[in-house]
Amino acid sequence: MSLDSQPPAAGPQVGADEWVARQAHRREYLPSWLGTGQRWLERVGWWPKLLVVGLAGAALPLLGLGGFQLQVGIDALVIALLAVGLNIVVGWAGLLDLGYVAFFGFGAYGFALLSSSQIGPNGIHLPTYLSVPIVMIGAAVLGLLVGWPSRRLIGDYLAIVTLFFGEAFVEFTNNVAPSVLGGPNGIVGIDPISVFGRQITTNAGYYYLLVVVLVLTMAVLRLLDTSRTGRAWRAVREDPLAAASMTIPVNRVKLMAFMFGAVVAALTGTIFAAQQISVFPTDFDTPILILIYAGLILGGAGSIAGAAAGALVLMVIYDGLLRSPTDSGYLFYGLILLTLVVKLRPWRRLAVVLAATVALGFAAHAVAGAISARAVAGGPHSTGWLAAALRDWVVVPANAQVLGNWGYVLLVCLLIALVQVGRRWRTILLPPTICLASFVWETRLAVEPAITRQLMIGAILIVMMNARPQGLLGSRRVEAIT
Amino acid sequence: MAFFFQELVNGITTGALYALVALGFTMVYGVLKLLNFAHGDLYMIGAYIGFFVIQWFGGPNALTIPVPLLLVIMFVLAAGLVGGLGVAIERFAYRPLRDAPRIAPLITAIGISFFLENSALLLFGAQPRIYNTPQFISFSSGIQIGSVSIDAVQILVLVLGLVLMVGLRLLVNRTKVGRQMRAVAADREAAEMLGINVNFTIAATFFIGSALAGVAGVMGGLLFNQVTATIGFIAGLKAFTAAVVGGIGSIPGAVLGGLLLGVAESFITGYISSTFTNLFVFALLIAVMLVRPSGLLGRAQLQKV
């Protein structure tokens, strides 16, 4: 840990207390050369970085991404936009908004109603430059209405009210006025979005639109972050009482965070509806909410770049890699190896664990094969060189669903034990755990990718909150007072 | 009028179920000030345990042991295993975050809930598991008062629910552990200074609360006849509503809230329409929160500085 007490900009900043400006910059850096890179990156201003990343994102389709990859990219960008919006409410203002996905749904349904043949004999079909602002203003008003209780409801109660608001939204769209909202069948035949008079009808077009909107939103939020309001949000998050005694209007500031979050979500909803051409109640249910949260937490709540990067990485894994057995295999074994290399110190311990794991796998395979040929009859689930490397290492019986299920239960118990025990036992337990994890992966998890990716989301939330609450990219602030 | 009383009885039965789940929820909130979003999923696990006990002893059509013994095994096993699971969750996921910002354990709880639900999906599959209660507990073995019929499963749920609620009340008010729980709920640091083993007390609270959810899960399986991996979420929401309407952290409040919710639901389904039941429940909760945020029996919290 090194303390760098140089303020980011020379000279006093307007509106920022000198001491605060200095202390806010005291951070923990990554070890060794990673920390050097981090410090170097911090010297570059925020907008060149954003511009470079945005251009790189826009250049991706030129490398020849096909239809599937483009769809993954669109989904990832949608979730990233939502995570960036959620970051305002959760990361900055510290309010647990569990109804956030309803604003996304409101945006999508609002846009769908205003630009389809759903209302009246001929439908409304408003032009984009009218419908999108109307929906965004509507979302702001809705955010105000939902956030209003936060004047009286503190902390947990707000989480409850918003959770039920989100559930009520799904129930509402499912059951109320089926002739207008379509019930479970949703609304279909939504007009495309038009920008400067040109209708966007291709997936590539929506990809570029989303990149532009994401970069612009991040830029606006970055300005907001360093504004008076942004500082007020963080003050309210850290200590509402102290903030109130510093004459910050706590309730109004909370409501503003709610409204800003709602507007970003609704904007995303309009693009989502136009790109999908249809909206259904299930698109805005709890799993999506948890997905957004997982992206935000993975990247680090409280930082715009963290929220966007976390959501993008998560969605590429969730939507892209986990669909193909080979890709997900690379990801799984790669992640295990990476975690071991990063976490196991000194290197002698790492070497011992790796050697023991490899030896244990081969030994288990040999023993199982000697007992019965059926015990090793089913090879690895993936293909390619990874499968060739694993064929004689991981034990995969011919029909292993029940055995795999018991292995899964045992694996969860082992993982819990691994966290609780001391360093020596951890070294001893690691090789069998890795072997068991590979067994469970090949017999159950790789077979059921749809469930595995949801398990991954749950695990991310639990592990990140316990091990690294500041997120993968976030840096832990050094507490001035302990 | 007969329809009214029939709906009332049905409502009280489901209400007793909601109350049991809400009790564990409200107890955990009392000692840790944590909204345990994973509580509904413990109910789901309890229901699965009950199902597998029935299968283990020959299935609903060809039971190898007498029905009362089967019920005892179901309830005891569900209570023990789910209680243990609750303690494990607390130890593994919540204890490290006890002094973290309030939002961290809440997000962890959401993660646990999602993890449990999908683990059940992985282990037990997506197809619903059928209890087939009428095969071994005949519906006609209930009692008939006028034109209102209360079948045997409903009697079981009502009696066992009542026993557990009274037992919990005695446990919290009369025993040493109960006194420790109340002390930890009132002020954790002060309780620790007075020599109370806070970790043990919190673990005990989790065990009892989760065991109640497990028992309620078996009851739910017997009553509604089927289990899927997704029943936990909606059960959690209902328990949530019951606990919050009654006043979160208050044990009599959870019982009252559960019964009110069950009866209200039953009447809406019976007299209006089953389409709007959930929407109505959610609206009711939001309305209670707006008018009386501390619930019916809860005391308004003073904000300590």
Image (cartoon, coloured by chain):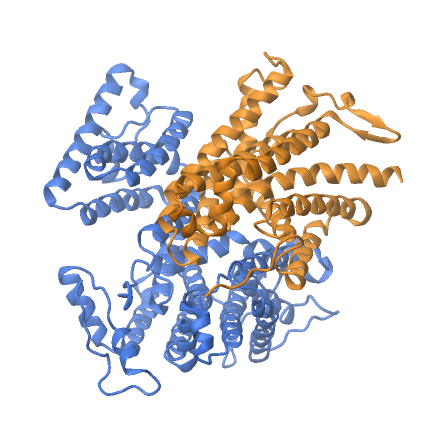
| Extreme residue in the front direction | B194
Residue A25 in sight: yes
Total number of numbered discs in the rendering: 0
Where is residue A52 shown, x and y percent of the image?
28, 73
Rendered view: B222 above or below A122: above
Q: Is residue B195 left or right of residue B5?
A: left
The residue shown at (23%, 24%) is A364
Where is residue A435 shown, x and y percent of the image?
26, 32
Where is residue B157 shown, x and y percent of the image?
68, 31
Where is residue A280 shown, x and y percent of the image?
60, 56
| Location of the N terminus of chain A (image quadrant) | bottom left
The residue shown at (38%, 33%) is A408
Rendered view: A98 above or below A192: above
The residue shown at (24%, 70%) is A26
| Extreme residue in the top direction | B64
Q: Colour of chain B?
A: orange
- Front one among A232 and A35: A232
Dividing the picture into quarters, in which one does residue A148 lie?
bottom right
Q: Colour of chain A?
A: blue
Residue B37 in sight: no
| Location of the C terminus of chain A (image quadrant) | bottom left
